[in-house]
Image: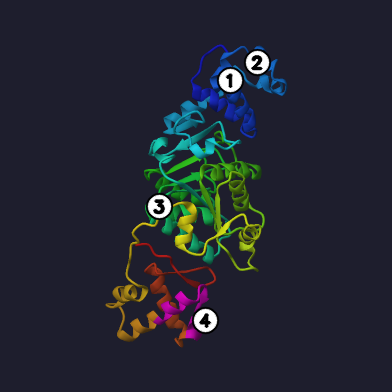
Amino acid sequence: MEKEYSEKVYYCTLNRLFGFRPDITRGIIDCLGSAGELFKMKLDSFWGQRGVFAQIAPMLNEKELQASEEELLMLGDRGIDFITIADKAYPELLRDCPDAPAGLYFKSCSPAEEVFNRRRPIAVVGTRDISQYGREWCQRIVMTMAESEGKPLIVSGFALGVDITAHLTALDTGLPTVAVLPTGITDVYPPQNRKYVDRLTNTPGCAFITDYPCGTVPKAINFLRRNRIIAGICSGTILIESKAKGGGMMTARLATSYNRDLMVLPGRADDIRSEGCNQLLKEKLAEPIVDGKGLLETLGLRPGIKRTRPGLMDEIETLFRCELTDIGLSEIKAVAKMIQKYRGISADELSAATGLNYSKIRTYTGLLECAGIISIDLLQRCSLMVRTV
């Protein structure tokens, strides 16, 4: 080569060229010790002895190195780093995987060494079509981990549904979280989640990562490559809800192939969103999540001191004692109790169960929703919000 480049440029070039064939990069590094050694030697003396590798020799040229250098300079101006597999800050568990990427694009307000390798990383993944049951349990699971002594790093894919629920609950409860993108580091997918980018990148210990070069669009094939990073980074994976086929199931099966812990949230036998979870339980590949203590034990986390907050009825009393009469307080508590007992209960069902007219039900559910005690979906079904301290 005419010019000598930094080691990051050499690794970035291998990643850009052979991202879908990490075995090629692994073979080169195992053979030569580093990416730089490949580009510094006379190619004829290497490729002539390596058979199949000779087919890709023409791709390793000055033009590709210049493109990598320009990309890294542009990203550096935007505060984005590229962590090579040879860097100490590279996720240790991911490095052990046979298909680990040559490097990761990294966007955070914290140094990479403070994000990775200091906490136990746990993946929380699942369907985009999350149910209220799945959302509620996803929040409970992350909150349980937030109360543990070891406080893990929550890793997910920044998708709609389970992923973004896990990320936001982690942020709300003080846990760091890492989002693994199926696109280039300067893009956001899905665009609906763009509003959360600044919050995540400005929170210490949190990060966006990807192994895709800038400009990569979210094609279907890109998600499997992304999912291997989620599973590879983490010592354990939690699948909240998933159909029989989908990204969550891919991540779960990848986790088992890496000999990592896998836990799933059991669901109803006839619920399509729980087909994948129930299938993994049937195959005895995963442990069921039935309580917080068992969850922490399986993941190797120790329970911490559990924080407490007022009971539901006491909280309602405090919030509305000055706003409602004694009768009103009694009625709104009755509504809250029914919602607590029957997840997804409708306004009509609440009216029948409590004996209150529809107008009062709408008033009380509106007050409870504004207070953050319940959520009401588009079909006007009411569910109790999972509450943090």
Q: Which residue is denoted by mark 2 in the rendering? A: 46
Is there CB contact under 8 Å for labels 2 and 3? no
Marks 3/4: CA distance? 35 Å
Give the position of the C terminus as an image quadrant.
bottom left
* Mark 1 or mark 4, earlier in chain: 1
Q: Amino acid at mark 3?
A: Leu
Give the position of the N terminus as an image quadrant.
top right
- Magenta span of residues: 334-353
Residue at point 54% right, 46% down? 189
Colouring chosen for the image of the structure: rainbow
Residue 362, given in percent of the width and then of the height, sits at: 44, 78
Is there CB contact under 8 Å for labels 1 and 2? yes
Instruction: State which mark lies toward you, 2 or 3.
Output: 2
Q: Which residue is denoted by mark 1 in the rendering? A: 32
Q: Amino acid at mark 2?
A: Phe
389 horizontally vs 40: left or right = left
Q: Main secondary structure of the magenta part?
A: helix
Instruction: State which mark lies toward you, 1 or 4.
Output: 1
Q: Secondary structure at mark 3?
A: helix
Q: Which residue is denoted by mark 4 in the rendering? A: 348
Let me know if residue 348 is in the magenta part.
yes
Marks 3/1: CA distance? 42 Å
Q: Amino acid at mark 1?
A: Leu
Give the camera-side residue of 173 and 269: 269
Q: Which residue is denoted by mark 3 in the rendering? A: 171
Q: Secondary structure at mark 2?
A: helix
Give the camera-side residue of 242 and 232: 232
